[in-house]
């Protein structure tokens, strides 16, 4: 800001009862500068102030974006803000495997599959949802949690509805940075359901979009539930987590 502009502003503010003064100072980073401040205030570096305001604006933008991403993720209310507590060695190993998967997909855009296998009540969904929330909060990645059956139902619900198409619904599940598919072994085995699951997995594979797959069935048995093509895709860059401990709901 030049001296004429500063004097004009000072004259205007003086007219409305606010006394402003020009102060000279020097920043160790940006050098000397003259600033117009309210009488009695300290000198500040305008370049530093601009950087600080830009950082604050970005922080606010990220907070708004992450809030939007959380809403779109459809994390079940039960799991929002909850943590998977790892105490036993096997549980710590699972948590470490999830961290390795996270680092792998954040390092570069690539297809990968985090496979969570175990009986009910072992914390598979809890850890998957914690992982999804961490991706949103710390990496600003888009995530969607849904059961495989729920995803198929949402797509099929578009049939015959004005403004909805099967293709549009498929693209919706392909767009997320990470898709968490719970109970992938529990879809109704119909030709349409199998085709939809295969199409989404295949497109995400081709677009280098990772998935998290949760199942009560052993990994080696998944082919008969998801089909050979999906089963084959899940083997590439696969990170398998075996939840081998007892049902926490029964032992609590």
Image (tube, rainbow, N blue to C red):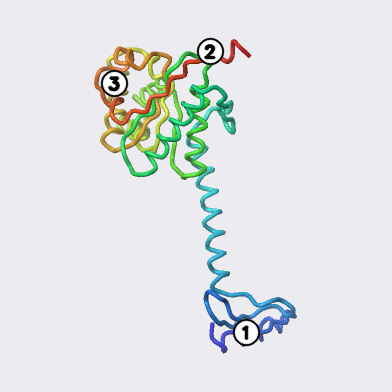
Within 10 angstroms of label 1, few (less than 14), some, or many (20 or more) residues?
A: few
Within 10 angstroms of label 2, few (less than 14), some, or many (20 or more) residues?
A: few
Query: In the image, which is nearer the foreground, mark 2 or mark 1?
Result: 2
Q: Viewed as shown, does residue 52 lie left or right of 73? A: right
- Between marks 2 and 3, how big is the CA–CA gap? 26 Å
Screen quadrant of the N terminus: bottom right
Q: Position of residue 174 (x, y in %)?
A: 34, 34
Query: Residue 132, relative to residue 57: is it above or below?
Result: above
Secondary structure type for disc 1: strand
Decide which of 39, 173 is in the foreground and name it: 39
The residue at which mark 1 appears reads as 24
Quadrant in the rendering for residue 149: top left
Secondary structure type for disc 3: helix
Residue located at (68% from left, 81% from top): 13
- Between marks 2 and 1, how big is the CA–CA gap? 70 Å
Decide which of 129, 86 is in the foreground and name it: 86
Q: How many marks do you count on the picture?
A: 3
Residue located at (59% from left, 14% from top): 249
Screen quadrant of the C terminus: top right
The residue at which mark 3 appears reads as 231
């Amino acid at each position: 800001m030049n001296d004429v502009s500063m004097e004009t502003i000072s004259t205007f503010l003086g007219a409305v009862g606010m006394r402003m003064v020009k102060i000279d100072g020097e920043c160790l980073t940006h050098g000397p500068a003259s600033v117009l401040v309210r009488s009695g205030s300290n000198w500040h570096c305008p370049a530093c102030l601009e950087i600080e305001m830009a950082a604050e604006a970005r922080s606010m933008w990220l907070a708004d974006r992450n809030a939007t991403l959380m809403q779109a993720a459809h994390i079940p209310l039960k799991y929002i803000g909850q943590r998977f507590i790892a105490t036993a060695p096997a549980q710590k190993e699972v948590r470490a495997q999830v961290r390795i998967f996270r680092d792998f997909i954040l390092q570069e855009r690539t297809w990968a599959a985090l496979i969570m296998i175990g009986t009910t009540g072992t914390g598979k969904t809890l850890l998957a949802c914690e992982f999804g929330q961490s991706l949103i909060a710390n990496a600003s990645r888009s995530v969607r949690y849904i059961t495989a059956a729920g995803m198929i139902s949402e797509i099929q619900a578009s049939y015959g509805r004005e403004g909805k198409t099967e293709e549009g619904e498929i693209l919706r599940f392909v767009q997320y940075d990470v898709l968490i598919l719970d109970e992938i072994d529990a879809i109704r085995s119909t030709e349409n359901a199998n085709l939809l699951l295969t199409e989404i997995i295949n497109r995400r594979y081709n677009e280098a979009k990772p998935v998290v797959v949760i199942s009560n069935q052993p990994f080696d048995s998944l082919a008969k539930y998801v089909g050979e093509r999906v089963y084959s895709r899940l083997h590439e860059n696969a990170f398998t987590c075996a939840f081998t401990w007892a049902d926490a709901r029964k032992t609590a």
